[in-house]
Image: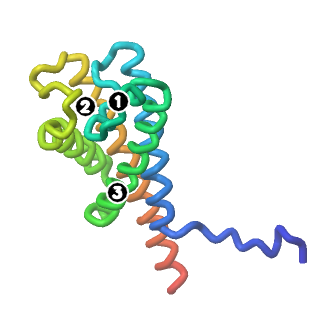
Amino acid sequence: MSNEENHSGKPMSLPVMVFWTGLFGGIFWAIIGFLSYLFNFTEIPPYVILDPLSLGSLKNQWVGTFISIILFGIFSIAAAFVYYGLMKNFTRIWFGIGYGLLLFLLVFFILNPLFPGMKPVFDLSSDTIITSICIYILYGLFVGYSISYEYQNQYVQKKEAAS
């Protein structure tokens, strides 16, 4: 029996997939946010997440940007598990879009005071608001649809295996 025949091709468990989806989604969309900042689509730098910490000028350098992107990935893991826990059964893309909008409202209206480098929502430019909403919607769509799809896929496989 060759090594290829011995490999069962077992899919990764759902919680592991949620972890990787959250990490990749957070890092990917944080990089998109950083590029949006570089091209002046938004006035919110990625290192705004480091504002509650006293890192001095380090946060404004490339190291601060790198750390910020990794932190977005870590926080995104938590957001992905929240989606998994509450909304994994919903298969429509609208739930992911709604989740992204909900995260936008949470960050920009409720958590805004934690980030002194970020102006209140109504003081931001329309470009910043629209770009941020779009990034959050696409993030929610990515995470939500990925988790729901995989949950439904594994549910069907288990159901077929049981019959």
User: Which residue is the site of mark 1?
Assistant: 56
Q: Secondary structure at mark 1?
A: helix
Q: Secondary structure at mark 2?
A: helix
Amino acid carrying mark 3 in the image:
Ala
Residue 81 figure quarter = bottom left
- Residue drawn 24% across the image and 17% down it: 127
Q: From the viewer's perspective, is 95 left or right of 63?
A: left
Q: Residues within 10 Å of mark 2 (few under 14, many from 20)?
A: some
- Compute the Cα span from label 1 to label 3: 27 Å
User: Which residue is the site of mark 2?
Assistant: 133
Give the residue furthest to the right: 1
- Residue drawn 46% across the image and 52% down it: 21
- Compute the Cα span from label 3 to label 2: 20 Å
User: Which residue is the site of mark 3?
Assistant: 78
Q: From the top left corner, tell me how far across and down residue 96 is, in percent.
A: 30, 48
Give the residue furthest to the bottom: 163
Amino acid carrying mark 2 in the image:
Ile
**10 or 113, which lies in front?**
113
Q: Secondary structure at mark 3?
A: helix
Residue 61 figure quarter = top left
- The answer to whether the residue labelled 3 contacts the one labelled 2, judged by CB atoms less than 8 Å apart, is no
Q: Looking at the image, tell me whether mark 3 or mark 2 is earlier in sequence order.
A: 3
Nearest-to-viewer mark from 3 and 2: 3
- Compute the Cα span from label 2 to label 1: 29 Å
